[in-house]
């Protein structure tokens, strides 16, 4: 099964343009991104207590993507969505944060819809782009992605907001 999964990943990446976010030689990440990368693979079950202390919410019972973004910003002295919204734990609170931009840069915040509700969403940090079969994908560093902090691809056309720090 692992061999099949690895083969699919290799095939997926074989015909694409890709920015490798792990390559320190190619990129000097903003401080807040470096802070976020320190939590890669923290899982809401196996690192529940550590995430609870970091986020001030229980990651098993609370959707925590916005809490993660806010905490990473706070750790770096950057005001979070609590400065612009009375609902800072919602991903869409970041639609009011910072300034809108058309093209993301590493470290910008991207908001995506989730489900059919007008208030639900997902938020994370932009890490790079990939184009596969003429479809652009954004690599997002975020919390609560498969119950952990990781980097996952989201279809760029689904983004409802790209925001950068003022």
Image (cartoon, helix red, strand yellow):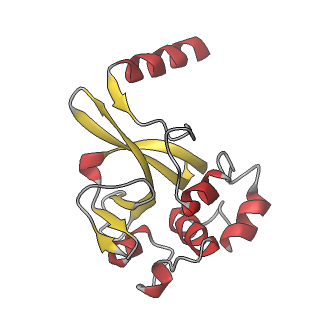
Residue 1 visible in the current orientation: no
- Pick the residue in front: 84 or 49: 84
Q: Position of residue 81 (x, y in %)?
A: 46, 78
Where residue 120 sits, quadrant-wise, is bottom left
Total marks shown come to 0
Q: Position of residue 69 (x, y in %)?
A: 53, 66
Q: Position of residue 84 (x, y in %)?
A: 41, 85
70 above or below 133? below
Query: In the picture, which quadrant includes the N terminus?
Result: top right
- Pick the residue in front: 82 or 25: 25
Where residue 73 sits, quadrant-wise, is bottom right
Q: Is residue 112 left or right of residue 4?
A: left
Q: Is residue 154 left or right of residue 80?
A: left
75 above or below 39? below
Q: Residue at x 50, y 41 (%)?
A: 21
- Pick the residue in front: 25 or 72: 25
Query: In the picture, which quadrant includes the C terminus?
Result: bottom left
Q: Position of residue 63 (x, y in %)?
A: 54, 64
Q: Is residue 50 left or right of residue 68?
A: right
Q: Residue at x 57, y 46 (%)?
A: 150
Q: Residue at x 60, y 51 (%)?
A: 149
21 above or below 78? above
Residue 89 visible in the current orientation: yes
């Amino acid at each position: 099964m692992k061999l099949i999964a690895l083969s699919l990943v290799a095939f997926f990446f074989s015909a694409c343009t890709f920015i490798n976010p792990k390559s320190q030689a190619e990129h000097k990440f903003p401080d807040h991104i470096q802070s976020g990368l320190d939590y890669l693979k923290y899982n809401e079950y196996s690192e529940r207590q550590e995430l609870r202390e970091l986020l001030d919410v229980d990651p098993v019972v609370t959707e925590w993507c916005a809490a993660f973004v806010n905490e990473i910003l706070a750790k770096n002295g950057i005001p979070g969505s609590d400065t612009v919204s009375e609902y800072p734990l919602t991903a869409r609170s970041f639609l009011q944060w910072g300034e809108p931009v058309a093209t993301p840069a590493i470290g910008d915040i991207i908001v995506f819809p989730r489900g059919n509700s007008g208030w639900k969403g997902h938020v994370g940090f932009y890490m790079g782009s990939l184009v596969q079969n003429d479809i652009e994908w954004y690599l997002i560093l975020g919390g609560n992605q498969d119950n952990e902090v990781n980097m996952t691809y989201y279809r760029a056309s689904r983004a409802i907001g790209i925001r950068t720090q003022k």
